[in-house]
Amino acid sequence: MRVAWIGLGVMGYPMAGHLVTRGGLPVTVYNRTASKAAKWSEAFKGPVAPTPAAAARDADFVFACVGNDDDLRQVTTGPDGCFHTMKKGAVFIDHTTASALVARELHAVAKEKGLGFVDAPVSGGQAGAENGVLTVMCGGDPEDYAKAEPLITHFSRMRKLLGPAGSGQLAKMVNQIAIAGLVQGLAEAVNFGMRAGLPMEDVIEVISKGAAGSWQMENRHKTMIAGKFDFGFAADWMRKDLGICFDESRRNGAPLPVTALVDQFYAEVQKLGGGRWDTSSLIARFQNLDKKK
């Protein structure tokens, strides 16, 4: 079996590594920044290719985790794209958070070339990728997903086919919409409790076991209280994802009033210089508002 991986960012780097360490698979990698690919190669003893097409040549499976729709088109159908060199019957698995439109577009192109295509965005953040416990939301044809699922298991604890091409990306939008509201609610609650003079560590210990509990509360309350925001998914990336959600909502007519408000708050975080802070940095807005008083 020949496997290729395109894109070695904070998510792709460990995910590709799990295919080697857990799956025992030979993986050829490509990354736009060559030094990152060289580092991965040294750590996991896999070859580096100079282009996506070279990495994917005669591959049975090609994984990608890149930045956005345009990046995805570039590494698939661009001049040096994977689709030109993958063999018939091979499957392309895309872990990029992108639009449902590009997923459907590339699925159609893949089928014309005799290839499989699965859109498979992930949730769980950098820690989930490093620990191999991601949630993977998939769209595509059942036969292609059936081929890909055994490999996806090496870096995930939950994976599921949710419908035809684009369904994985739509499910990721649902995920991000839900998270946006949860993080803002937690930021408001923690800020309120701190202003009230409560021992917030103790408060969270109590309420997290009740109806208010969530992953965000369990994993991000300490960083919010401490005002440290270097622990995961960046505000810049969240705004990119929410932009995809808004584009889709304009097509399907679903109102997103809370999400739109939270997106404005993330824009304020960016203005504070917090574009690379993690999503729990919403609480930093309150501290900035205090300074303005």
Image (spheres, rainbow, N blue to C red):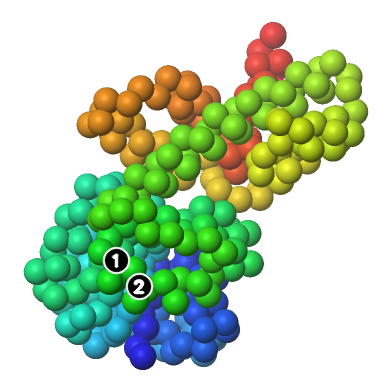
> Looking at the image, which residue is at 63% across and 26% down?
185
- Distance from disc 1 to disc 2, alpha carbons, whole Å, reads 6 Å
Q: Residues within 10 Å of mark 2 (few under 14, many from 20)?
A: few
Choose top left, top right, bottom left or bottom right for residue 56.
bottom left
Numbered circle sitting on residue 31: none
Placement of 25 over or under 278, stated as above or below:
below
Is residue 282 among what the camera can see? yes
Query: In front here: 194 or 93?
Result: 93
Q: Which residue is mark 1?
A: 142
Q: Is residue 68 visible to the viewer in this orientation of the structure? A: no
Dot 2 amino acid type? Ala
Q: Which residue position holds label 2?
A: 146
Are the two marked residues, 1 and 2, in contact with CB atoms closer than 8 angstroms? yes
Q: Nearer the viewer, residue 265 or 50?
A: 265
Of residue 261 and residue 205, the one placed in the foreground of this image is 205
Q: Is residue 227 rendered to the left or right of residue 76?
A: right
Q: Residue at x 52, y 84 (%)?
A: 23
Q: Quadrant of residue 243?
A: top left
Name the amino acid, label 1. Answer: Pro
Q: Position of residue 6 (x, y in %)?
A: 36, 71
Is residue 55 placed above or below 122 in the rendered structure? below
Q: Residue at x 35, y 88 (%)?
A: 2
Residue drawn at x 63%, y 59% as measured from the top left: 127
Quarter of the picture containing the N terminus is bottom left
SS of the residue at dot 2? helix
